[in-house]
């Protein structure tokens, strides 16, 4: 089921409550698709860096080879915000008069810790990864942070597109007002115009640069929004445990994603209690079935794949290859 979904999409997001095995399932699915002959990029947006722990090696913000056909990277929030702020600061330095650069620096220093700055920076980085990754890879797999963070992240493209559009409209109004003021007080000499020293030209270049920057950001966010809401390209997989809180959180997350026009096409119930393994696990399994009945009643149309609890932790490529084979050979009970 998971492999068929990975074969049919360009972008797969894995999300769910913390501790249910999102990183393991997303990595094993990416590996199974790579074994299938595809070029796959595995991306972690979780600041916990579990991807590196899973593969038992260091993974940074640039793609590294994890296995044949599989590259991986981790989006570090602190590094992403730092690079994001540097890019914006450099752009503003080019666009604003030199005498205002100290004010720009002061404003950017205050903005670094503003609410939502980390999410906005991560979102812009995701947009870059999607834009380039869909050209270089057959599939991009995102291992996301726990549900609440991911739900906010998924609605951000729409919000950021609308916010940037509002900035553009206000910028256009300001430009028109500035043009009127310039027309009223036009006094540049012919010499200034001939030798390119006309401050009016400088103002127009700055206004054009600001509009260009805003339009570029708007295009990036709208492109990401369109790709995330395109069911032919993108799907979301919710990973959960057969327990009360993960089930309830899954139902809530699906509703939030539906509002954001994100398609949830698979539920993966991880670490299920195996059958016929003694009274304790049978009692545990009976409780799990009650929770699964709640899940099925709330989300009856979404396919479900159950994966059973293993005796040992999954660490390293060999263990992930074994999990990838379980995903490839999966058959529903």
Image (cartoon, grey):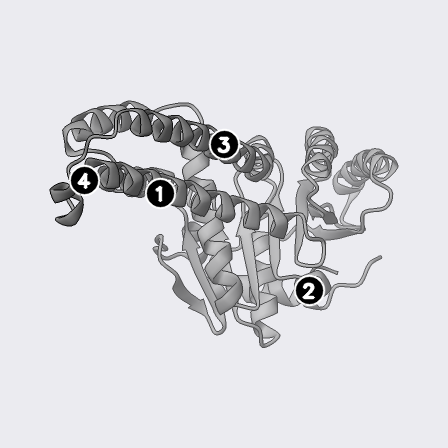
Pick whichever, 260 or 91, lies toward us.
91
Mark 2 vs mark 3: in front: 3
Q: Are marks 2 and 3 in contact (CB under 8 Å)?
A: no
187 horizontally vs 205: left or right: left
Rendered view: 144 above or below 133? above
Q: Earlier in the sequence, mark 4 or mark 1?
A: 4
Quarter occupied by residue 147: top right
> Distance between the Cα atoms at labels 4 and 1?
16 Å
> Distance between the Cα atoms at labels 2 and 3?
45 Å
Mark 3 vs mark 4: in front: 4
Residue at the spot of label 3: 169
Pick whichever, 126 or 46, lies toward us.
126
Residue 162 percent across, percent down from the top left: 56, 33
Q: Residue at x 18, y 35 (%)?
A: 188
For the residue carrying disc 4, how many other residues have a C-alpha within 10 Å: few (<14), some (14-19), or many (20+)? some
> Distance between the Cα atoms at labels 3 and 4?
26 Å
> Distance between the Cα atoms at labels 1 and 3?
13 Å
Rendered view: 166 above or below 59? above
Pick whichever, 281 or 59, lies toward us.
59
Q: Earlier in the sequence, mark 2 or mark 3?
A: 2
Q: Are marks 1 and 3 in contact (CB under 8 Å)?
A: no
Q: Which mark is residue 3?
A: 2
Q: Residue at x 36, y 52 (%)?
A: 61
Q: Earlier in the sequence, mark 2 or mark 4?
A: 2
Residue at the spot of label 4: 198
Residue 132 percent across, percent down from the top left: 46, 61
Mark 1 vs mark 2: in front: 1
Q: Earlier in the sequence, mark 1 or mark 3?
A: 3
> Distance between the Cα atoms at labels 2 and 4?
62 Å
Q: Secondary structure at mark 2?
A: helix
């Amino acid at each position: 089921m998971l492999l068929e979904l990975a074969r049919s999409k360009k972008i797969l997001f894995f999300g769910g409550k913390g501790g249910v095995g999102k990183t393991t399932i997303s990595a094993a699915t990416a590996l199974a698709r790579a074994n299938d002959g595809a070029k796959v990029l595995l991306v972690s947006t979780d600041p916990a860096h579990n991807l590196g722990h899973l593969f038992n090696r260091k993974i940074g913000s640039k793609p590294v080879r994890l296995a044949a056909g599989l590259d991986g990277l981790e989006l570090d929030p602190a590094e992403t915000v730092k690079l994001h702020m540097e890019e914006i600061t450099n752009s503003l330095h080019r666009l604003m008069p030199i005498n205002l650069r100290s004010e720009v620096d002061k404003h950017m220093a205050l903005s670094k810790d503003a609410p939502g700055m980390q999410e906005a920076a991560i979102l812009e980085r995701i947009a870059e990864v999607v834009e380039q990754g869909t050209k270089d890879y057959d599939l991009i797999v995102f291992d996301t942070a726990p549900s609440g963070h991911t739900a906010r992240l998924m609605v951000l493209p729409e919000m950021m597109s609308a916010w940037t559009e509002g900035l553009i409209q206000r910028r256009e109004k300001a430009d028109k007002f500035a043009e009127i003021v310039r027309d009223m007080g036009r006094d540049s000499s012919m010499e200034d115009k001939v030798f390119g020293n006309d401050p009016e030209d400088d103002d127009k270049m700055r206004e054009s640069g600001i509009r260009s920057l805003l339009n570029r950001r708007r295009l990036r966010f709208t492109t990401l929004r369109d790709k995330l809401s395109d069911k032919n390209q993108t799907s979301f997989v919710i990973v959960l445990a057969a327990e009360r809180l993960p089930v309830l959180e899954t139902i809530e997350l699906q509703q939030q994603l539906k509002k954001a026009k994100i398609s949830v096409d698979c539920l993966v119930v991880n670490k299920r209690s195996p059958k016929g393994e003694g009274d304790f696990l049978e009692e545990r399994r009976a409780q799990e079935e009650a929770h699964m009945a709640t899940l099925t009643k709330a989300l009856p149309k979404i396919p479900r794949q159950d994966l059973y609890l293993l005796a040992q932790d999954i660490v390293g490529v060999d263990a992930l290859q074994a999990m990838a084979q379980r995903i490839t050979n999966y058959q529903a009970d």
